[in-house]
Image (cartoon, helix red, strand yellow):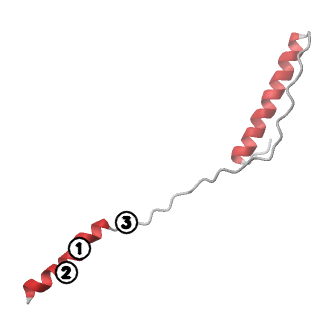
Amino acid sequence: MKIQLAPLFLIPFFISGCFTRIVKEPVYIPTKCEISMPLRPNFHSNTAQNVKDLLIYTQELENDLRFCINGEVF
């Protein structure tokens, strides 16, 4: 009788290694950002003004990108 009951207790022990654990991980869902792209500056004959306008433009792009990714407002 003991020999017949032993497999009944051992089988669940061996099969328990096949059970999966519940692992909760964050799922990132892509969302569309509703920000319009800023207008690119026109080039002037003044090089210093061109550089200033391009730096302002790139800063606006970086701020918009940060807002879309992290929700940070600058």
User: Residue 36's spot in the image, x, y percent?
Assistant: 83, 40
The quarter in which the N terminus is drawn is: bottom left
Q: How many marks?
A: 3
Q: Which residue is mark 1?
A: 13
In this rendering, the answer to whether 68 lies above or below 60 is: below
- Which residue shows up at 82% across the image and 36% down it? 37
- The amino acid on which the numbered mark 1 sits, given as a three-letter code, is Phe
Disc 1 secondary structure class: helix
Q: CA distance from mark 1 to mark 3?
A: 14 Å
Depth order, front residue of 68/30 = 30
Mark toward the start of the polypeptide (1 vs 3): 1
- Which residue shows up at 73% across the image and 39% down it? 65
User: Residue 17's spot in the image, x, y percent?
Assistant: 28, 66
Q: Is residue 24 left or right of residue 72?
A: left
- Which residue shows up at 23% across the image and 73% down it? 13
Q: Which residue is mark 3?
A: 20
Q: CA distance from mark 3 to mark 2?
A: 20 Å
Disc 2 secondary structure class: helix
Q: Is residue 15 left or right of residue 63?
A: left
Mark toward the start of the polypeptide (3 vs 2): 2
Q: Residues within 10 Å of mark 1 (few under 14, many from 20)?
A: few
Q: Residues within 10 Å of mark 3 (few under 14, many from 20)?
A: few
Q: Residues at badges 2 and 1 in contact (C-beta under 8 Å)?
A: yes
Q: Which residue is mark 2?
A: 9
Q: Residues at badges 3 and 2 in contact (C-beta under 8 Å)?
A: no
In this rendering, the answer to whether 36 lies above or below 17 is: above
- Which residue shows up at 34% across the image and 68% down it? 19
User: Residue 61's spot in the image, x, y percent?
Assistant: 78, 33
- The amino acid on which the numbered mark 3 sits, given as a three-letter code, is Thr
